[in-house]
Amino acid sequence: MRRVFLSMTTMLAACSSFTPPWESTPPPTTIGARTTGGAASTGVPAGFYRVNPGDTLQSIAGAFGQRPQDIATWNGMSTETLVTPGQVLRVSPPSLTPGAGAVPPVGAPQAPSSAAAQQGVLTWPLRGPILKRFVPGKTNGIVIGARVGETVRAAAGGRVVYAGTGIPAYGPLVIIKHNDSLITAYGQNSKLLVQEGEAVTQGQPVAEAGQDSNGVGSIQFEVRQDGRPADPLAWLPR
């Protein structure tokens, strides 16, 4: 299992200030201690990442929802090549041509033709009160109240690109890639029911809900479109 070296303070703090591991425009700090800032302030353009101590090709690939062999190909290296601190790697495809490339995972929604959200494309990972809403520029997702142990289901078909506990504040975390533009993440679980690389269908159990640092049963649910945080409620059925 790939390890993602990320550190955060609390789940709710992460929701407002942390750049998740599937961010497409990474700042040039360690995967485990990112800061805000774009290419103008960091010198690393969108779609690239500056290697930091402790990073491996596998951990970087997992952090950006890519396959190690793809990142190796994009950077003219092999999967056995050791990355070195300071090295800048391409972490997104050199070009994205509609209709080309890998076949979408089983049951995955087709990539939207525009940046507009598609109401109802996703299904609820579980039903519960919204404890924290999405606020553009301030939060990365929503927090849904739940019973501890309640089944968390895939919001759409796709492939699991991360399943682990390498991000402490997210707890046991599942990240599913649905197509080239859409990714969902399910954090703050008590138990994971899927493994990295596994194809999942919409509604398939992927985890069991956990609780936050205050003992409140809930999960963190995030949606990323083209690498940017999106309001999950705009994608879920009303």
Image (cartoon, helix red, strand yellow):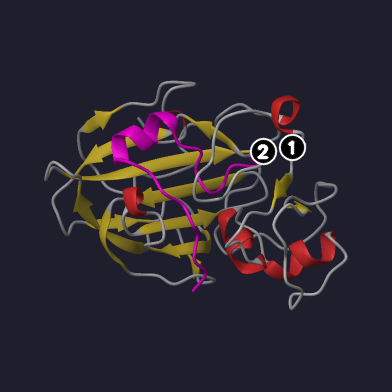
- Quarter of the picture containing the C terminus is top left
| Element carrying mark 1 | loop
Is 213 or 95 nearer to us in this picture?
Answer: 213
Determine which quarter of the picture holds residue 13: top left
Marks 2 and 1, how far apart at CA = 5 Å
Question: Eyeballing the image, is 88 above or below 105?
Answer: above
Is 67 or 52 nearer to us in this picture?
Answer: 52
Q: Amino acid at mark 1?
A: Ala
Q: Which residues are magenta?
A: 1-26
Q: Which residue is mark 2?
A: 25
Give the crowd class for mark 1: few <14, some 14-19, many >=20 residues within 10 Å: some
Point 84% across, 69% down: residue: 77
**Residue 226 drawn at (x, y percent):** 65, 38
Determine which quarter of the picture holds residue 116: top right
Residue furthest to the right: 76
User: Are the residues flagged by discs 2 and 1 in contact, CB closer than 8 Å?
Assistant: yes
Q: Is residue 22 magenta?
A: yes
**Residue 123 drawn at (x, y percent):** 39, 45
Point 33% across, 26% down: residue: 133
Q: Is residue 5 left or right of residue 85?
A: left
Question: Eyeballing the image, is 136 above or below 185?
Answer: above
Q: Which residue is mark 1?
A: 46
Dominant secondary-structure state across the stretch colored magenta: loop
**Residue 86 drawn at (x, y percent):** 73, 52
